[in-house]
Image (cartoon, rainbow, N blue to C red):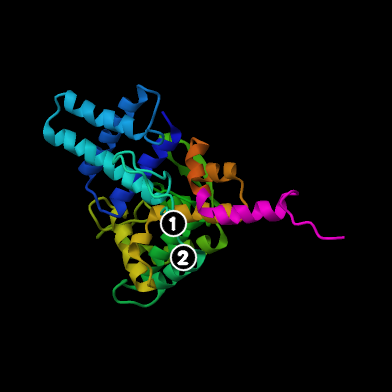
Amino acid sequence: MSGAASGWVDAFLEMMAVERAAARNTLTAYGKDLEDARGFLGRSKRDLDDADAEAVEAYFQDLGARGLSPATAARRRSAVRQFYRFVLGEGWRTDDPSRRVAAPKAGRPLPKVLERAEIERLLAAATAPNTEMGDSAQGLRLACIIELIYASGLRISELLALPLTALARDPAYLIVKGKGGKERLAPLNDAARAAVNAYLAGRRTFLPKGAKESPWLFPSRGGSGRLTARRVGQLLDDAAIAAGIDRDKVSPHVLRHAFATHLLEGGADLRVIQTLLGHADIATTQIYTHVAGEHLAHVVQTKHPLGRKKTPH
């Protein structure tokens, strides 16, 4: 199966969890539904990233032929349609094969990505005195979360699973356990390290009631004992509104997206970005390249020998 499709499914489920606050049971069901679709498509050596309208229509017809309950079949069709709407919105495909409608050639939607100036505004809103954002400790915590994701490209699940010991000694990088238990190094810049230290000074504010300590970097008084992805999404919504940014444009996934996009714009090698993001397949990483299309075109025109304008003698 395609590595790109796996990455797209993970991104879709993360979006559903954070931006739409989907319940765990819903996420599990959608994950199984998409795996079912991938299994069917795999019979013809296709996957969700390269399936055409005929292949998707054949899958929908197969659902009816299996004798599934109408509710189950409808949910699986809905999961596939929502997945492709998300993929189309991110710009990873230029068509939606689940609708048999060709995407317009012009005005293709670009993936959600924050400009550097918008990230600065988001950070300023997080730490500015604001009754809606909560006290200063909450602002420092949110600033720390934003800086960590933007500096290292962490997935929200990886961030919230960090133990306190991972950052207790002001490290220059993190050892992150990603998908499949694979470890990778995630660098931390000076801004992220400063944000961590500022947050740690008031971290005890968030310890569960009566607890003297917590093993998590981001503890919480909630039932899980640590901060949840849903709560992070809510806090980012508040910061976006305070910063005057469309809140639909802000999420942990978008911050991770910005990390990769801005690295690419700065000239980083795609293989390096693949390693930093923890992608098993570089095809998944390549989804970021179109965002920096104009920048890359400029690099070719100015750096490639045949692209440079010759000066008259």
**Looking at the picture, how far across and down is residue 131, in whole percent?**
30, 76
Q: Quadrant of the C terminus?
A: bottom right
How far apart are labels 2 and 1 at the CA level?
8 Å
Q: Which residue bears the numbered disc 1?
A: 255
**Looking at the picture, how far across and down is residue 206, in whole percent?**
32, 62
Res 119 label: 2
The answer to whether the residues at label 2 and label 1 have Cβ atoms under 8 Å apart is yes
Q: Report if residue 296 lies within the magenta region.
A: yes
Snapshot quadrant of residue 172: bottom right
Q: Which residues are magenta?
A: 290-313
In-front residue for pair 108/224: 108
For mark 1, give the secondary structure: helix
Q: Report if residue 57 lies within the magenta region.
A: no
Q: Using the image, determine if residue 160 lies above or below residue 125.
A: above
In-front residue for pair 189/206: 189
Q: Amino acid at mark 2?
A: Ile
Q: Using the image, determine if residue 299 lies above or below residue 284.
A: below
In-front residue for pair 52/76: 52
Q: Is residue 226 left or right of residue 296?
A: left
Snapshot quadrant of residue 6: top left
Seen as rendered, the residue at the extreme top is 43
Q: Using the image, determine if residue 5 lies above or below residue 214.
A: above
Note whether residue 12 is visible: yes
